[in-house]
């Protein structure tokens, strides 16, 4: 495995806010130094839907000595808005690459789910609801697959005109992406849990054996007991109209050691399986802070490897220390 990476969220835009508030460049710089110097990561996948934040964080990551996977992760844009955002990002990523940084450009993430008009639904929550209705989802997949393919067929040549480094796309399995125009095959469905554990080795071998480098651009585990069995499922938390965590949807017990085991075990499988790059999701879920009230300890539903405190600072979880040991051993 060439790249042991960490995802760093600069703010997924939803309900008039983002998942990274407040956004403090000084704190971001410190976080990226921690990712490089304490977790011993080689690269960081920088995600988010605000272009200036993406560019600033990418520059700070390069300064810290990290390979940058510059990754727009938009929400609620139509096709025209999405294309403009992706091409703007390609130009910014190229400026960084020309300054001497190692940069991979990711031409979007999970577009069928987050883009208006690709799947039925007025917004992301309505589209996410399709995942609980297999019949409706199956009926909607052909049109969504065609929309993603058509978009990428237009976007990839235009990205190539603007960005001179390697490119990829953070895909969902049902999108059935045509990888001919990409340098790296990538999937945001890198999760192993009870639903796919029996077939996971075969699926991984098939993904790696497609003739191009393969990247697991997203995998992780929440911090409650039993989370590893449903690692690919949604977070057990509801949100208010402002996008803030409102309540946990189940009684949960903290299990930081379970999260740590899951991440390291999967990284070892990726390493043994010939994966090019693997990105843990995620460094911090700032929209899911811990609280003094166990019933509202939203960190239990977080996949972050640090625990975000009410004042916005953080403290390492067991997963942080386990990943640091993994990274040290690779070095």
Image (cartoon, rainbow, N blue to C red):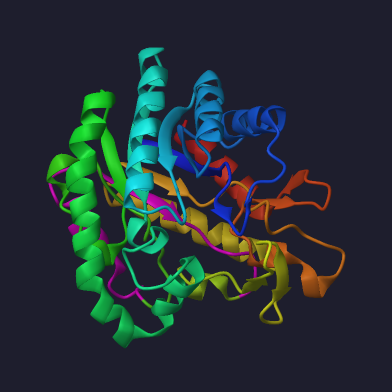
Number of labelled discs? Answer: 0
Could you say where residue 191 lies in the image, as x and y percent from the top left?
41, 63
Membership of 308 in magenta stretch: no
Q: Is residue 294 visible?
A: yes
Q: Quadrant of the N terminus?
A: top left
**Vertical order, 115 against 133 (above or below):** above
Residue at position x 36%, y 25% in the image = 91
Residue at position x 38%, y 31% in the image = 88
Q: Is residue 202 visible?
A: no
In the image shown, does 282 or 148 lie closer to the viewer?
Answer: 148
Could you say where residue 50 lies in the image, as x and y percent from the top left?
53, 40
In the image shown, does 309 or 202 lie closer to the viewer?
Answer: 309
Asked if residue 64 lies left or right of residue 96, the reply is: right
In the image shown, does 317 or 33 lie closer to the viewer?
Answer: 33
Asked if residue 303 lies left or right of residue 84, the reply is: right
Asked if residue 88 lies left or right of residue 50, the reply is: left
Residue at position x 22%, y 33% in the image = 158
Residue at position x 48%, y 72% in the image = 233
Could you say where residue 230 lies in the image, as x and y percent from the top left?
49, 74
Q: Looking at the image, which residue sits at the far right?
A: 292
Could you say where residue 207 lies in the image, as x and y percent from the top left?
22, 56
**Vertical order, 154 against 250 (above or below):** above
Asked if residue 127 lies left or right of residue 257, the reply is: left
Q: Range of the magenta residues?
A: 196-225
Membership of 201 in magenta stretch: yes
Q: Residue 155's image quarter?
A: top left
């Amino acid at each position: 495995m060439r790249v042991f990476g960490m995802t760093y969220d600069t703010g997924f835009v939803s309900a008039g806010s983002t998942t990274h508030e407040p956004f403090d460049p000084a704190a971001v710089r410190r976080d990226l130094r921690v990712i490089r110097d304490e977790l011993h990561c080689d690269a960081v996948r920088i995600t988010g839907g605000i272009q200036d934040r993406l560019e600033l964080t990418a520059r700070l990551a390069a300064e810290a000595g990290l390979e940058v996977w510059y990754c727009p992760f938009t929400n609620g844009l139509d096709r025209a808005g999405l294309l403009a955002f992706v091409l703007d990002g390609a130009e910014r990523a190229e400026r960084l690459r020309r300054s001497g940084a190692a940069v991979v450009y990711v031409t979007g993430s999970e577009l069928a789910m987050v883009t208006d008009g690709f799947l039925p639904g007025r917004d992301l929550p309505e589209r996410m609801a399709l995942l609980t209705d297999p019949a409706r989802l199956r009926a909607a997949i052909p049109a969504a697959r065609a929309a993603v393919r058509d978009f990428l067929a237009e976007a990839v040549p235009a990205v190539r005109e603007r960005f001179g480094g390697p490119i990829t796309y953070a895909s969902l399995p049902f999108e059935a992406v045509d990888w001919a125009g990409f340098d790296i095959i990538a999937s945001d469905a890198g999760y192993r849990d009870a639903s796919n554990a029996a077939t996971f080795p075969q699926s991984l071998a098939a993904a790696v054996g497609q003739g191009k480098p393969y990247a697991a651009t997203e995998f992780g585990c929440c911090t409650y007991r039993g989370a590893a069995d449903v690692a690919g499922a949604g977070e057990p938390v509801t949100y208010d109209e402002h996008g803030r965590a409102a309540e946990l949807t189940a009684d949960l017990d903290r299990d930081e050691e379970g999260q740590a085991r899951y991440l390291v075990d999967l990284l070892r499988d990726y390493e043994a399986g010939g994966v090019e790059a693997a990105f843990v999701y995620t460094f911090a879920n700032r929209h899911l802070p811990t609280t003094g009230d166990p019933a509202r300890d939203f960190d239990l539903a977080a996949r972050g490897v640090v625990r975000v405190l009410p004042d916005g600072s953080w403290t390492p979880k067991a997963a942080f220390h386990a990943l640091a040991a993994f990274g040290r051993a690779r070095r």
